[in-house]
Amino acid sequence: MLVERRATGEPVAYIRGLKEFYGLVLAVDPRALIPRPETELLVELGLGHLRRSLTERPRPAGAPPFLVWDIATGSGAICVALAVESRRRGYSADVRFRASDTSPEALSLATENAVGHGVADVIGFSVADLAALADLDEPADAARADLILANLPYIPSAVLPTLPVAASFEPQLALDGGKDGLDLVRRLLAQLDSALAKGGVALLEIGAAQAEEVRAAASRSLPGWELDIHADLAGLPRVVELRQPDAARAAA
């Protein structure tokens, strides 16, 4: 019975099998985290970067498509939303997408969502450990991305037992960020220099109290990179934008 499932605290999205995100209806189930409204900011910022990169600074003739890499894609919400909106805006011929995750089960859900929204033809799915290029079946030069987006687990391990009961139904791998919540964020920061193409940009979702810790970690792993913090609709720090030094000069 649906009522009995809800009485145990199971999230409504899992009971319905659906969740609305960035104007799309996505399939959701315990294979992946339920997309949160605050993550829509990643999509907004990603689309802004795509627009600037593809219309204000057109790519040279013969250049490969602009590569967007959604790391730890989960349900595929970010990548699917970006692909759908890019197609609507007429960017499809100039951009391709990669969605990766350590979980094959999550990737299968992301693939289902891409097929359901008609964008599976522009998204490549890969099992990969964060931005490890060695996990990809591509030459290193082709594997480097122009734009990386990631909503990694960032909840401190000790906080997990205090979350609402609904969170206990979600995959803990998608929530647990280690002692201070930033274990995976630090690992990804250390990989960005090799994972991004020249002039690349990374957008990382973080917890509202983690901005200064991430700033310090980025200064150690990526000296000379430009860093901005974007606030969500509640005014809380939510997305870190990292730009390679030559990307910063181009934006100046």
Image (cartoon, rainbow, N blue to C red):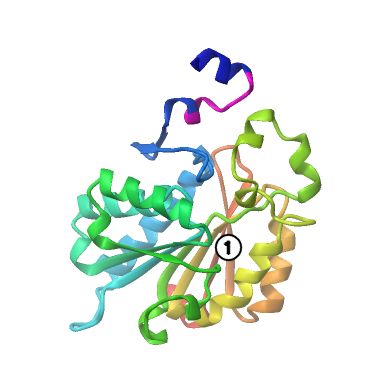
Measuring from the top left, give residue 114's x and y in whole percent.
31, 50
Q: Position of residue 176 (x, y in %)?
A: 69, 51
Q: Residue at x 38, y 54 (%)?
A: 79
Residue at 69% of width from left, 30% of height from top?
164
Relative side of 56 to 46, left or right: left
Visible residue check, residue 145: yes
Q: Which residue is found at the position 44% from the left and 75% from the top?
A: 200
Q: Nearer the viewer, residue 179 or 31?
A: 31
Disc 1 marks which residue? 228
234 relative to 184, above or below = above
The amino acid pointed to by label 1 is Asp
Which contiguous range is marked in magenta?
8-14
Q: Is residue 45 left or right of residue 50?
A: right
Image quadrant in which you'd find residue 166: top right
Residue 9 on the magenta span: yes
Q: Nearer the viewer, residue 60 or 9?
A: 9
Which residue of the protein is positioned furthest toward the front in this rendering? 1
Label 1 element class: strand
Residue 252 seen anywhere in this rendered image of the structure: no
Give the x, y percent position of residue 89.
22, 53
Relative depth, front residue between 200 and 30:
30
